[in-house]
Image: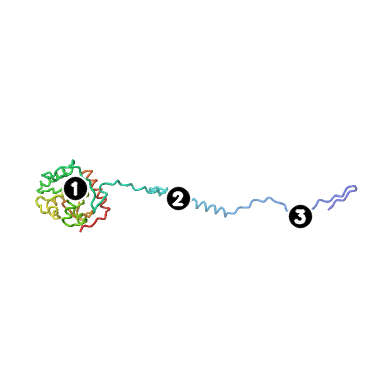
């Protein structure tokens, strides 16, 4: 309601009532309390944390098991290159025979009464001891052929091949080509039975007392048969052919050859 106007003063208006304020202005902004946050995001967060913990625990457990078994999680190193083996004189083959060096004449000693059959000193000494041991039991080990030069092997191989009209392969089954015979080494020897000479250089030698004695005793003197039945080199059975393997040089010479034999595909003997 308006106040009464006084004389000499401009009439005063009553202050506007609250109802005269436009609605938009009249609304009072009241500071509201923050609404309680939804629990949904807390559940999501908890789930993610749980997954992370489980995954991390599994990873650490896996690593621990790998350590216990000697396996690490680091990437496997690339494989090292295979160490190359230095070529030896026995690497190359001709007709299933391996190349062998020729023994120096200065290292040879006689093992026969006429001094015509020789072996390397260490092999000759052992062979003489073996002959003496066999003789004490009534067995005669007769040396037939031992060291043979490359030139002598040339005649044995090619001349006999021509006489018998053999092919190179046929001849190689019973005799090595020159440069590829164990006889070159001075460690190999052909042995016969002095009491049964008819079996010399024949498979029938296996039926003699000398062969039986060798089978039972040769290893005591570091001798072994070079070409037993079914040998991997594919050479015809030679019960008379034995070789000394009683020192470092002979062992390496023949057993390096044997390693290559085992990898080879031999030509079967007829």
Q: Which residue is farthest right?
A: 7
Q: Which residue is farthest top?
A: 106
Q: In which quadrant of the rendered image does the C terminus lie? A: bottom left
User: Which is more N-terminal, label 3 or label 2?
Assistant: 3
Secondary element under disc 3, as helix, strand or loop, is loop
Q: Which mark is residue 110?
A: none
> Which residue is at a point 27% across and 54% down the rendered structure image?
264
Name the mark nearer the viewer: 1 or 3.
1
Counting other residues with Cα less than 10 Å from the Cα at mark 1, is it few (<14), some (14-19), or many (20 or more)? few
Residue 122 appears at what percent x and percent y? 18, 42
User: Which is more N-terminal, label 1 or label 2?
Assistant: 2
Residue 141 appears at what percent x and percent y? 12, 48
Residue 158 appears at what percent x and percent y? 18, 53
Q: Nearer the viewer, residue 119 or 243?
A: 119
> Which residue is at a point 21% across and 43% down the rendered structure image?
247
Secondary element under disc 1, as helix, strand or loop, is helix
Secondary element under disc 2, as helix, strand or loop, is helix
Residue 214 appears at what percent x and percent y? 15, 50
Side of 236 relative to 23 (left or right) = left
User: Which is more N-terminal, label 3 or label 1?
Assistant: 3
Give the CA separation, mark 2 to mark 1. Answer: 73 Å
Counting other residues with Cα less than 10 Å from the Cα at mark 2, is it few (<14), some (14-19), or many (20 or more)? few
Counting other residues with Cα less than 10 Å from the Cα at mark 3, is it few (<14), some (14-19), or many (20 or more)? few
Name the mark nearer the viewer: 2 or 3.
2
**Residue identifier under label 2:** 59
**Residue identifier under label 1:** 151
Q: Are marks 1 and 3 in contact (CB under 8 Å)?
A: no
Name the mark nearer the viewer: 2 or 1.
1
Give the CA separation, mark 2 to mark 3. Answer: 67 Å
Give the CA separation, mark 1 to mark 3. Answer: 133 Å
**Residue identifier under label 3:** 22
């Amino acid at each position: 309601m308006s106040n009464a106007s006084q004389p000499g003063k401009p009439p005063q208006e009553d202050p506007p009532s609250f109802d005269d304020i436009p609605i938009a202005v009249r609304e009072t902004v009241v500071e509201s309390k923050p609404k309680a946050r939804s629990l949904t995001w807390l559940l999501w967060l908890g789930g993610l944390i749980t997954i992370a913990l489980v995954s991390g625990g599994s990873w650490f457990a896996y690593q621990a098991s790998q350590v216990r078994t000697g396996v690490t999680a680091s990437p496997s190193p690339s494989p090292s290159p295979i160490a190359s083996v230095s070529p030896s004189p026995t690497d190359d083959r001709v007709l299933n025979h391996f190349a062998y060096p020729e023994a120096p004449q200065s290292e040879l000693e006689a093992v026969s009464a006429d001094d015509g059959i020789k072996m390397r000193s260490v092999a000759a000494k052992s062979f003489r001891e073996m002959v003496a041991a066999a003789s004490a039991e009534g067995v005669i080990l007769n040396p037939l052929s031992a060291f043979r030069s490359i030139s002598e092997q040339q005649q044995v191989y090619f001349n006999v091949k021509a006489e018998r009209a053999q092919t190179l392969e046929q001849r190689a089954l019973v005799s090595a080509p020159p440069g590829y015979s164990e006889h070159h080494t001075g460690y190999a020897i052909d042995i016969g039975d002095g009491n049964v000479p008819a079996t010399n250089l024949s498979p029938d030698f296996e039926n003699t007392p000398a062969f039986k004695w060798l089978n039972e005793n040769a290893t005591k003197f570091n001798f072994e048969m070079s070409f037993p039945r079914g040998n991997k080199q594919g050479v015809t059975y030679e019960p008379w052919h034995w070789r000394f393997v009683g020192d470092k040089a002979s062992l390496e010479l023949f057993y390096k050859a044997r390693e290559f034999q085992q990898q080879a595909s031999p030509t079967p003997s007829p």
